[in-house]
Amino acid sequence: MLPRLFFTHFRETSFVAEDGGWLAGFLCGFLSQTYPDQAYVHFVGVAPDRRGDGLARDLYERSVALDPTFAPAWAQLGRCYRIIGKYIESSPGSAQKAEQAYQRALELNPRLTIAHKFYAKLESDTGNAEGAIVRLLTVATRHGNDPELFAGLVHACRYAGLYDESIAAHAEASRLDPLLETGFEQSLMLAGDVERLRELAPAEMTGGGDAGIPWRLAGCRHVAIGGSAASYSRSRR
């Protein structure tokens, strides 16, 4: 639990959500003292029994309603729209809402790399993985030391069928930030690199930007019991 000081000194940019008097979730945002026109989300949390019901989305919606220029919150809101619409509660307008949120984030801050990464996943989902790759590489030529860009390339390259390039993007992202999760094990599987996939520690097989997606875990189990990556790749198509 966060110390009370966060909600004392940053109460104007922090929110809590209650359910029957119990804490259901919270969001803490900080305004920069160096750059007064910039801010970022420092903490966000949702109670385990409230996950999956859109509470994080509601907190981010409140955040951007209070400060429409808060680019990181727009990026995270777009991710909520995409994840909820794709995996939790199917909605015809979720992809459009996510795209609008990402575009707003990048309009406010074209260098916001998490927005580029999240947007690349949506573009890949909607059949524009090649466009996502071009955009990420263009940004990387200017800001090539940011691991989030390469994490986005892991996803986009995989959707474009560039499995080796996806794995190489993971290597660069890990070099820049060894703790960043990229979900590259899916690329290993589709590339047919079963031996390397088997060598991964369990923690490495369950992370990534879309952590907890059932098909990924099912695929890992498939390989573990002797199924080939090639047959799994065919089943995905």
Image: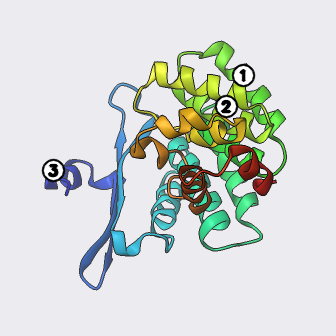
Give the camera-side residue of 223 and 57.
223
Q: Residues within 10 Å of mark 2 (few under 14, many from 20)?
A: many
Residue at the disc numbered 2: 153
In depth, the one of 234 and 75 nearer the eye is 234
Position of 205 relative to 11 (above/below): above
**Point 47% across, 19% down: residue:** 175
Q: Which residue is mark 3?
A: 5
**Could you give the CA–CA distance between mark 3 and mark 2, rounded to whole angstroms?**
38 Å
**Image mark for residue 137:** 1
Earlier residue among tags 2 and 1: 1
Quadrant for residue 31, please give it.
Answer: top left
Q: Residues within 10 Å of mark 1 (few under 14, many from 20)?
A: some
Chain-order first, disc 3 or disc 1:
3
Q: Residue furthest front?
A: 226
- Contact? badges 3 and 1 (CB < 8 Å): no
- Name the spot of residue 59 as percent of width and height, x first: 45, 63
Q: Locate residue 128: give its quadrant.
A: top right
Task: Tell us which disc is closer to us: 2 or 1.
Answer: 2
